[in-house]
């Protein structure tokens, strides 16, 4: 059963930061399928042009704008270009992220700062710059966070700290912007199989099987799973939901759900 109706977002404008690849591009394409006008933003000129074409291929009206989320003025210009074309913005997805695995002792101050600036400052910049361009009441703002915000992960000191900041910002802005009729939420994806990042994290069949065995649902998610959560949170059906971090992660944050996580005692 599919809850979503093609064309449900016709006439709505969606702004996707970090939309040139992976989960965010998947979200942009899904909104395109649903009839929305879509602006995709990324710092990479070549990738953003390709991404805009992919979104257009869904039948949507789409533009690609080059902007580094660390640069507030560039982000503001991207919003201005979007509203100039389509008017007020209904949905903002803040998904730009930088990441690599490194022990904390391998991180220079600049390495830590770089990831915090892309993930946390970048999210602040996108959300802050969006405010004047949002449809009020009715707009929905969604940040893409990660499980390590709530449960730290080894070799992720930089990203865990940055994502924890995003979760906190989600709550603050939900309270400050609720009276204006803007809902502010976050989505926390688990391992998403159809992305390049996942192939890097679990490169072998053995590593894949091990990771899947620890998940309650025993499988990776897909970009579509994340995009559908974004559709729901942006829809009128979610009109009373704000300030939440929605885990779309197959149960990842529950902990290790593998059969060998605990040894059952002999039954007496
Ligand atoms: C240690 C590193 C490093 C590494 C970079 N640095 N890679 N330090 N280990 N592997 C350091 C550099 O040496 C430099 O510090 C500083 O970080 C900045 O690096 P630059 O290359 O100058 O920065 P920039 O060009 O802005 O690149 C940003 C980046 C880049 C984050 C470093 O790697 C990037 O954009 N990566 C891909 C993005 C990505 O994978 N996004 C998906 C996120 S998915 P010094 O001191 O030398 O100047 C996600 C889900 C989480 O977040 C799931 C994981 C469990």
Image (tube, grey):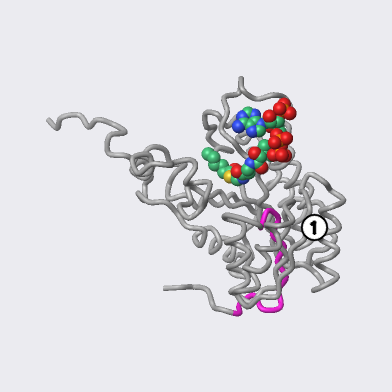
Q: Residue at x 79, y 48 (%)?
A: 125
Position above or below: 212 against 136: above
Position above or below: 101 against 132: above
The quadrant of the image that shows the C terminus is top left
Overall secondary structure of the magenta stretch? loop
The crowding category of the residue bearing disc 1, from other C-alpha atoms within 10 Å (few below 14, some 14 to 19, many at least 20), is many
Q: Position of residue 68 (x, y in %)?
A: 77, 49
Q: Position of residue 130 (x, y in %)?
A: 80, 57
| Residue 70 visible (yes or no) | yes
Specify the quadrant of the image occupied by residue 93.
bottom right
**Depth order, front residue of 138/143:** 143
The quadrant of the image that shows the N terminus is bottom left
**Depth order, front residue of 192/143:** 192
Magenta span includes 150? no
Specify the quadrant of the image occupied by residue 260.
top left
Magenta span includes 12? yes
The magenta region covers 7-19
Residue at the far front in the pictured view: 46
Q: Position of residue 20 (x, y in %)?
A: 65, 57
Picture quarter with ligand 1: top right
The residue identified by callout 1 is: 130
Position above or below: 60 against 70: below
């Amino acid at each position: 059963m599919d809850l979503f109706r093609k064309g449900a977002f016709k006439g709505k404008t969606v702004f996707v930061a970090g939309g040139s690849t992976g989960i965010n591009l998947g979200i942009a394409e899904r909104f395109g399928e649903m009839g929305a006008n879509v602006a995709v933003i990324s710092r990479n000129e070549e990738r953003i042009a390709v991404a805009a074409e992919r979104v257009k291929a869904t039948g949507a009206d789409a533009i690609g704008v080059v902007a580094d989320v660390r640069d507030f003025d560039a982000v503001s210009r991207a919003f201005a270009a979007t509203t100039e074309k389509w008017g007020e913005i209904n949905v903002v997805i803040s998904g730009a992220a930088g990441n690599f695995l490194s022990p904390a002792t391998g991180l220079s101050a600049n390495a830590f700062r770089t990831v915090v600036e892309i993930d946390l400052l970048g999210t602040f910049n996108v959300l802050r710059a969006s405010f004047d361009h949002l449809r009020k009441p009715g707009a929905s703002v969604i940040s893409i966070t990660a499980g390590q915000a709530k449960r730290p992960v080894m070799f992720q000191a930089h990203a865990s700290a940055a994502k924890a900041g995003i979760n906190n910002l989600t709550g603050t802005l939900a309270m400050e912007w609720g009276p204006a009729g803007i809902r502010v939420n976050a989505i926390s994806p688990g391992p998403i199989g159809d992305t390049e990042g996942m192939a890097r994290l679990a490169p072998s069949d053995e590593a894949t099987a091990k990771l899947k065995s620890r998940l309650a649902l025993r499988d990776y998610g897909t970009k579509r799973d994340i995009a559908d959560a974004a559709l729901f949170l942006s829809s009128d059906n979610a009109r009373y939901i704000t300030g939440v971090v929605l885990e779309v992660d197959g149960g990842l944050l529950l902990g290790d759900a593998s059969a060998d996580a605990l040894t059952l005692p002999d039954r007496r």
